[in-house]
Image (cartoon, rainbow, N blue to C red):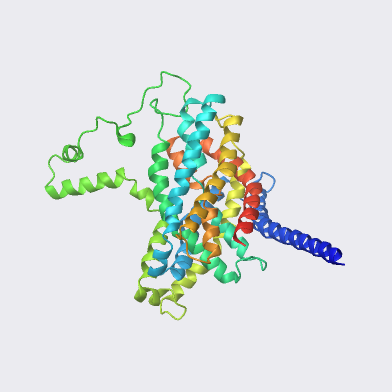
Amino acid sequence: MDMERFLSAIVSEVQAGGNSLLVTIKIAVLPIAKVFTMCFLGFLMASKYVNILPASGRKLLNGLVFSLLLPCLIFSQLGQAITLEKMLKWWFIPANVVLASISGSLIGLIVALIVALIVRPPYPFFKFTIVQIGIGNIGNVPLVLIAALCRDDMNPFGDEEKCSTDGIAYISYGQWVGAIILYTYVYAMLAPPPEGTFDIKDQNIPVKNLLKDNTPAHVPLLIQEVASKYPDAPKKEETKGFLMYWFDKLKLKQIFQPPIIASVLAMLLGATPFLRRLIFTPDAPLFFFTDSCIMLGEAMIPCILLALGGNLVEGPGSSKLGLRTTAAVIFARLVLVPPAGVGIVMLADKLGFLPPDDKMFRFVLLLQHSMPTSVLSSAVATLRGCGRESAAILFWVHIFAVISMAGWFILYFRILF
């Protein structure tokens, strides 16, 4: 009888473990399935058979999302969740973004060196390969996944509203660091080669004047440059010219994009008790503005997924990277980078850097290491002249990310719960 009870207990435990695994897989796969469904509808709307969402329409939709809907979502959710105490408690979120970029870039460097020795990719794309592996999407894709996950009644994080508000606030809090990395580190890494272009066919192409973009070693002192630029201007004009020079040099116009401005405003207003009570609390006199932003922000998720699906209709384009280099980038970004992120987050947890008993906080940190290549890095690549290759990487990495993200979700849920 004792042996029968023992065997019965083992069978029950195995069945419970199997059911638990199935529930975990369901919870992990459902958000990805929702994202894939909406992307497919965008793809269908943009196809030549329907053509409701042509290239011009997608451009307008992307502009609307980036300039209005996403900033509204960030402002309303981050502003309601943030306080000065939480800003200090959440310090590891921006630090994790920096660590994700560093670890991803180191992995990218190793892979790029291996690819350079074995595959021999086109000469100008060594640093490009590092960037495509190292810089993940810490903004719109995680926001979409969190929203899809929290809408499910079976989500392991509990109350839908708290799950969504906390998750979006955590993701938004790290976006300003990501923007600085994009328009400083990524912008510098994607500088054209000495020939002045990534499209190197004729070795006799004249080298562009790189003074404006790359600042070679023989640039005169800043004060001299400003003085030569404004020889007859008074001292006030020289100061203005000096500031404008640095404004242009630091790419501040690119850094201060609408989502970043919304993040900064939300942090400033939310962390100031008087302004918080004036704008973000439900009985505040200016809460109507926050409520309007909430309604507009709710439209961000479907719009950005329709636009992303529509962009995939154009296919990978005429990339010069080659199949093996593209495959190496995708494998490194989706398979090699996330384990390094798991190690970073678990070490931070052991050292006591993370808020205790906050599963969503840890999940967002893990997400920051697991996303496909940044969509905004493609915009920077376009500015630098390698937009076609970046679009090809984005196309394939988002296709395969549907599978990889489901797998990483299962692992993360098993670690956290």
Query: In the displayed structure, does residue 375 sit left or right of residue 246?
Result: right
Determine whether 205 is above or below 323 in the image: above
Which x, y percent locates residue 344?
50, 51
Determine whether 133 is above or below 306 in the image: above
Viewer can see residue 51: no
Viewer can see residue 409: yes
Q: Quadrant of residue 204?
A: top left
Which x, y percent locates residue 158?
61, 70
Instruction: Identify the residue at the far bottom of this view.
Output: 283
Which x, y percent locates residue 283?
45, 81
Residue at screen point 54% across, 54% down: 366
Query: In the displayed structure, does residue 351 sit left or right of residue 307?
Result: left
Q: Quadrant of the N terminus?
A: bottom right
Residue at screen point 62% across, 39% down: 315
Q: Nearer the viewer, residue 78 or 9?
A: 9
Q: Quadrant of the C terminus?
A: bottom right
Q: Quadrant of residue 47?
A: top right
Q: Quadrant of residue 395?
A: top right
Q: Nearer the viewer, residue 396 or 243?
A: 396
Q: Nearer the viewer, residue 15 or 312?
A: 15
- How many numbered tags mark residues here? 0
Query: In the displayed structure, does residue 76 sit left or right of residue 147?
Result: left
Residue at screen point 45% across, 55% down: 175
Which x, y percent locates residue 272?
35, 71
Instruction: Identify the residue at the far front of this view.
Output: 2
